[in-house]
Image (cartoon, rainbow, N blue to C red):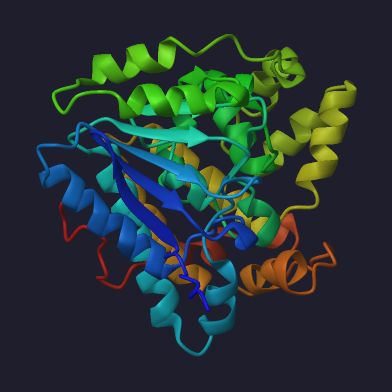
Amino acid sequence: MEMQTTLPEVIVERQGAIGRLRLNRPRALNSLNRTMIRAIAAALTEFERDPGIAAVLVTGEGERGLCAGGDIRMIYESGRERPEEGAQFWREEFIVNSRISAYSKPYIAIMDGIVMGGGVGVSSHGSHRIVTERTRFAMPETGIGYFTDVGATWLLPRAPGEFGTYLGLTGRDIGAAAVIHARLADSFVPSERIGELLAALSSLSATATADDVSAAIRAVSSEPPASALLDHLSAIDRCFAFNAVEEIFAALEKDESDFARETLELLKTRSAISLKLTLSLLRAGRSSATLNECLEREYAATLGMLSNPDFYEGVRAAVIDKDRNPKWSVELSEATPDLLARFGRNDGAALFAGKA
């Protein structure tokens, strides 16, 4: 009888001079757990030290996407009784996000299919980020009582105009052209040419440079399909330019377009705490000098999340019961500065020990 071998949740392998990371939890849409984060961290160290590795490539197994996020079910189940487990997961995840951003070798992410939450963290911080016509990209955290993390409070404020603010607050999923416009990806490669790209990358030599990687991607890239969302950039810039969620709501109410009306209705379904916290963090990220500053701020906010009823209610509605009908704890007017203050205290548990 032939023995069946169970593959690890992150398949680490070498293809030519490419170090590959294949996220391998397809039934869970490759959602990241602590085992996977630690495997990625170890592989990054191994590949960085190996002179035979020219670049690192991350992809997702299965047909549905790169990665749908972090293991929020684990945090939901452990958060109240064992909060240290959630805190440790976020700590290790955010440190990996920082490492990817500062990686000394080209880091290539193929963002095919679903790329959300933690999936953004292991892709958009890379040096070479590729989307396809199947890409569904989002930071949907305000819909689960959480906030935009994994360094998104650094990435989103660097999108043109207020497009990043719009993405962070609404949690709307977007396609390839909009992801590239937001500076969260660099190149569009049709999914039918991904195999050709993988072959080209695998044929690179150990002395290949970032320019060589770019050339291989450019050879199979093209213009992405148009995005209807980008037709509304002027309205987005006008309505999302404010530093208070109430003012954004008012601007959308004043605008008479169908787009503004639909956007406002979407925002009204989001957690008020999440909206205000996310906007505050996005504005702080806009004036930050480094990604690590934003990750430190985000980490402090995660510790507050472990006692936030909206987080548990949001995960319940989206992941546990799947009724898609969360009952948030407060209205927008009740999400006061005093209430939000608890998401800025880290009680000395700094992420980078003062090295931000």
In the rendered image, residue 197, in percent from the top left (x then y), is placed at 45, 23
In the rendered image, residue 170, in percent from the top left (x then y), is placed at 69, 41
In the rendered image, residue 348, in percent from the top left (x then y), is placed at 24, 71
Query: Residue farthest to the front?
Result: 1
In the rendered image, residue 212, in percent from the top left (x then y), is placed at 26, 15
Observer-nearest residue: 262 or 129?
A: 129
Mark yes or no: residue 224 visible.
Answer: yes
Residue 288 placement, left or right of 194: left
Residue 167 placement, left or right of 199: right
Observer-nearest residue: 193 or 239?
A: 193
Picture mark count: 0
Please give the name of the residue rendered at 67% of the width and 68% of the height, measured from the top-left corner: 315
Corner quadrant of residue 82: bottom left
Residue 209 placement, left or right of 15: left
Observer-nearest residue: 291 or 16?
A: 16
Corner quadrant of residue 83: bottom left
Please give the name of the residue rendered at 52% of the width and 60% of the height, measured from the top-left corner: 70
Q: Is residue 47 above or below residue 333?
A: above
Q: Is residue 208 above or below residue 84?
A: above
Observer-nearest residue: 56 or 168?
A: 56
